[in-house]
Image (cartoon, coloured by chain):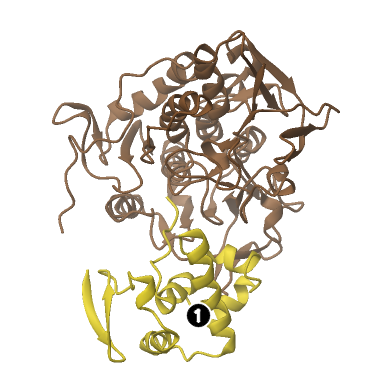
Chain colours: A yellow, B brown
Amino acid sequence: MTTATIAGKEITLDDEGFMTEYDEWSEALGEVLASQIGIEMTDAHWEAVRFLRKDFLEQGVTPTLRRVSTVGGIPIKELFGLFPKKPAKKMAYIAGLPKPAGCV
Amino acid sequence: MKHLIILGAGTAGTMAANKLRPLLQRSEWDITIVDQTTEHHYQPGYLFIPFGMYTADDVVKESRSLLADGINFVNSEIERVDPDQQVVHLANGDDPKYDYLLIATGTHPRPDQTPGLDGPEYGRSIHDFYTLEGATRLHKALESFTGGRLAVNVVEMPIKCPVAPLEFTFLADSYFKKRGIRDKVDMVYVTPLPGAFTKPVAAKSLGGMLDERDIGIEPDFMLERVDTDEQVLVSYDERKVPYDLLVTVPINMGADFVARSGLGDELNHVPVDKHTFLSKKYDTIFALGDAAALPTSKAGSVAHFAVDVFTENFVNYVHGRPMERSFDGHANCFIESGDGKAMLIDFNYVTQPLEGMYPLPGIGPFPLLHESRRNHWAKLAFRWTYWHMLLPGHHLPVPNAMSMAGKHEEDS
């Protein structure tokens, strides 16, 4: 665990830079986290990230790509377009959620 | 009279029924177990069929013969559960009522969920080894394979027995060597994970083992479709992996009745409390084994450790007492690595597979995360243990909860 100051706010991060405190996040912060990994947020990006935040609150785990697609209604192909290469990881990073567990 | 209905006579359902029967008074409790087939398969044995090490006879028994006296077996497909009325609608026309329901209908490969996979090439250039039919067909395909590119692909996680695709790959390498054609076979392991396995310490040693065997790895590969004309796997980010022979591990999904009953998540697995297996929605429904949405491996060993916790808790629960035991996600898997050797991994919800000795520190006799002949023989001997010890519900001399004794803490 480390702390960092982003956009004037102190936040708690795990070893890989994923936020660990759900309530420390804000959309302004999400915007900054996105820019750090080269993503400029559009409405389509926000739709995915907001679904992740809402679903995490209800389920207690970061949703998989399949769940974002079947429950959140955003096709996997589109997620790869919005968050290139590693959409599950990138979405979780921007949404301030734990890295997807990668099922065991 | 109270009625417990168990859906599914696989590993978890059979063990739970046999363990609960002596714990629930026969004058007070009926136990019914429902399954769509009359055959019980030793699923870990499928792995050996493609290489001619096992045949169908080694892995099939009649389900009824594995159940203790006093358990009703019903052979029917399941239409739907009505959780509010506490009724199961069966395809045979019966609608039994339950006081408590245990869902143990497992998870199953679904090639129909990926475009191009479940077409005319399935069973020809595309094979699976997670069904008896698939493993048997693959045996023939391997026998007539004389060289070319073999791709082993895991379509999506979670899958049952998540180490089996790697085991298959190692065994295939060993099999081709024995036939003297390894130099004519180009092997690639194609996975949606960032490496050979999910957890770092095991991923490192398993990844090293792919390297040593000259098996390529294509990580972070999310399969979108299979182009059977060009014989390529196509990912969502438009990478292509060619194959001559494709061994697929399709998307795994829970039973369709789970979805029809409104009891499942997006993969028809049942969301339950990860320590007690009680449904998150209904206080009369539990789900056990692969059917449950749990953050641990879908594997027989998990079902085994889970059943011990479940049965004790269940007896307390139905008598209005608190469920005192808490499942830790314990899994214990032998990993065949080819050439008559195997590895062993032992882990739970919080501790990843580590190096060391199991079950006794320093003594073992089973080394963790290292190849040994002893592990291989233990894996083969396990089939006997499964039929004669595990399913009847006898006690095995290994700890139920995972223990750190004998494990080496990760260097950090």
Seen as rendered, the residue at the extreme right is: B93
Relative height, residue B189 to residue A95 (above, below): above
Q: Position of residue B303 (x, y in %)?
A: 47, 33
Judging from the image, mark 1 belongs to the subunit labelled: A
Q: Nearer the viewer, residue B267 or A60?
A: A60
Q: Residue at x 67, y 59 (%)?
A: B114
Find residue B40 and report its horizontal and vertical position in percent.
62, 23
Name the residue tied to disc 1.
Answer: A83
Q: In the rendered view, does B93 fall on the left or right side of B122? A: right
Instruction: Tell me where residue B96 sits by quadrant.
Output: top right
> Horizontal and vertical percent for residue B79?
78, 38
Residue B309 picture quarter: top left
Camera-nearest residue between B107 and A19:
A19
Q: Residue at x 62, y 41 (%)?
A: B141
Three-letter amino acid code of the residue under disc 1? Phe
Q: Quadrant of residue A47?
A: bottom right
- Residue B264, relative to residue B12: is it above or below? below
